[in-house]
Image (spheres, grey):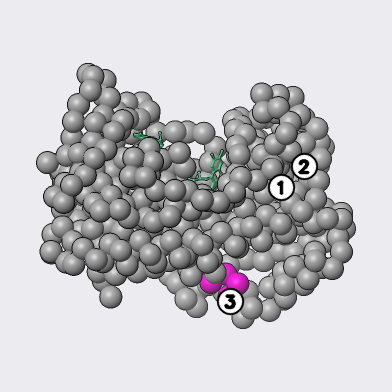
Amino acid sequence: MHDVIVVGGGPTGFVTALGLAQAGLDVCLLEAEDAIDQSPRACVYHWSMLDGLERLGIREEAERAGYTKDDYLWLVKQTAERLPYDLKVLSAVTRFPYNIQLGQDRLARICEARLAALPNAEVRFSTPMTALAQDADSVRVAVEGPDGPEFLAARYLVGADGAGSAVRKAIGLGFDGMTWPERFVATNVRHDFESGGFGQSTMVIDDRWGAVIVKITRDGLWRCTYMEDAALPEATYLERMPEAYRNLLPGEGGYELVRSSPYMMHQRCAESFRKGRVVLVGDAAHVTNPTGGFGLTTGLFDAFALWPTLAAVLLDRADRALLDTWADERRRVFLDKTSPQACAYKDFVFHARGGGPKLEAALDGMRRMVRDPDYRLERLMFTKGLETMSPAER
Ligand SMILES: Cc1cc2nc3c(=O)[nH]c(=O)nc-3n(C[C@H](O)[C@H](O)[C@H](O)COP(=O)(O)OP(=O)(O)OC[C@H]3O[C@@H](n4cnc5c(N)ncnc54)[C@H](O)[C@@H]3O)c2cc1C
């Protein structure tokens, strides 16, 4: 019997598994697909998460694999107003006053390589979990591996299997919330954004052509995410992309589309993050629209607080009720902070409604952030507020 089975080889599953395995637990990670998903998805690790990566021993490698950045711009398309700022004020509160830009697949691959070097960790691809049952002592799962069906058991199970979580469904937890009427289109593209005056991270504020445009590799690959009406057929989104790019890409030069992925956005949260010996992290527990990059941030903070808690329960016989404290605190963070702020950012960037008092009020906040370093620090501290300590370590 394993100590912990982690279902799902996305970033939160891999980070949780690495923390647990490095703490000395016997961990088995199950991933349904035959490799880590490489589609364009989350790619920013806010400064506030770097302590958590450092504790796992992977901050430096993540920094080398990606790149660090602190250059931000809010750009109002209609008026061409530019609101640039950097993160230098953060040096008052952290050793790492910058964000890391790195595809989530690459973060998962860093963890995968570390796990491969540990005798107490096993990563199994092409092995979806198909059923789950638990009793007072253990969790048992059925999997469909390359060699056929199999049964595995563990003392605890972490559901890190994404928004459609089979784990969440198997333990009968609801996933209340709403689905947005718009579709996001995430594209990886090569284009000379810098000569067009864009910052490394640029939020283009506009009710028709709002976009989040971020440089994601040192050698000039950019993520350009924009929105379209979800009533338009998804199958033909590529046909509409040239028009979107005509409006989104600055300057005259051409572009090379490298990858793209349309996706529906939701605001949803599981009714609990724990049931018995099963806990949920990341998108299995909560999903948000990605404006501001708070979704994976919250998911990784779930993981950073979970692995020491589970390790304390399993290795030090700490009270299992700590897992309830963990679960309640992580759920409150999502409902009270992550979700409202991601919705406010989406509204600000993509629904400027041709200007007006609402946009002006939001822009006034940004203008103050640009000119007032104390206020900038206060605003930048928001993502630190998405962190909770492991209740086992207070
Ligand atoms: C196209 C797209 C773009 C995005 N862009 C951004 C962004 O710019 N910023 C941002 O913050 N967020 C973004 N997100 C959201 C972000 O990608 C998620 O928050 C993040 O992937 C959550 O990580 P996770 O590990 O919890 O789940 P996932 O990454 O979804 O990983 C879940 C894993 O579980 C596996 N799995 C599923 N079922 C089973 C099973 N039964 N057995 C075993 N394995 C299973 C899946 O194959 C998958 O590998 C985007 C999402 C999408 C879809």
The image's mark for residue 211 is 1
Which amino acid type corresponds to the residue marked 3 in the rendered image? Glu
Which amino acid type corresponds to the residue marked 1 in the rendered image? Ala
Residues in magenta? 377-381
Residue 46: x and y in percent read 50, 59
Write the residue at 23% across / 40% down.
Answer: 133
The dominant secondary structure in magenta is helix
Residue 120: x and y in percent read 15, 44
Residues at circles 1 and 2 in contact by the CB criterion of under 8 Å: yes
Circle nearer the viewer, 1 or 2: 1
| Residue beneath disc 2 | 248
Give the Cα distance between marks 1 and 3.
25 Å
Q: Quadrant of residue 131?
A: top left
Residue 207: x and y in percent read 80, 50
| Residue beneath disc 3 | 378
Dot placed on the residue nearer the N-terminal end, 1 or 3: 1
Pointer 1: residues within 10 angstroms few (<14), some, or many (20+)? many
